[in-house]
Image (cartoon, rainbow, N blue to C red):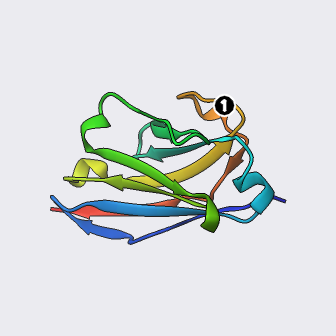
Amino acid sequence: QVQLQESGPGLVKSSQTLSLTCTISSASVATHPYYWAWFRQPPGKAMEWIGTIAYSHTTDYSPSLKSRTFIDRDTSKNQFSLHLSSVSPEDTAVYYCAIGPFPGTEANHYDYWGQGTQVTVSS
């Protein structure tokens, strides 16, 4: 059973950088050429794709968040991370990590998901 676990601060101040890490329980999955993605779901809104990093470390970001987003990965630690800069209360959401065999912006492209972590941005 593959498990993903998000970790990071639950409260971030406006203008700061939000940093989250996703740890994958299976080393075989972590070293497989999957695509690793971050999503978020603000309260009362739909799930939103943030960005994806490929096994090759190539990244793709949502156009609306691209200027503030950086995703990297550390295969040796079975981890990948999200860094979202200059946050505001509008970035308050449950953040999810996910992995799957195909790239894409839709949640159904990804097979394995973390349970999600609430991040609140204070003004």
- Which residue lies at the image location 62% right of the left edge and 42% below the top edge? 55
Residue 123, by quadrant, is bottom left
Taking the image as shown, residue 89 lies to the left or right of residue 71, namely left
- Which residue lies at the image location 69% right of the left edge and 41% below the top edge? 34
> Is residue 52 visible in the rendered structure shown here?
yes
**Circle 1 sits in a helix, a strand or a loop, which is it?**
helix
Q: Is residue 66 above or below residue 40?
A: above
- Which residue lies at the image location 46% right of the left edge and 52% below the top edge? 72
Residue that numbered label 1 is attached to: 109
Dot 1: within a 10 Å radius of its alpha carbon, few (fewer than 14), some, or many (20 or more) residues?
A: some
Q: Is residue 27 above or below residue 59?
A: below
Residue 83, by quadrant, is bottom left
- Which residue lies at the image location 43% right of the left edge and 70% below the top edge? 8
| Residue 29 in picture, x, y percent from top left | 76, 53
Q: Nearer the viewer, residue 56 or 98?
A: 56
Which amino acid does the dot numbered 1 rest on?
His
| Residue 96 in picture, x, y percent from top left | 53, 52
Taking the image as shown, residue 25 lies to the left or right of residue 55, namely right
Q: Nearer the viewer, residue 30 or 119?
A: 30
Residue at the far right: name it: 1
Residue 56, by quadrant, is top right
> Is residue 65 visible in the rendered structure shown here?
no
Q: How many marks?
A: 1
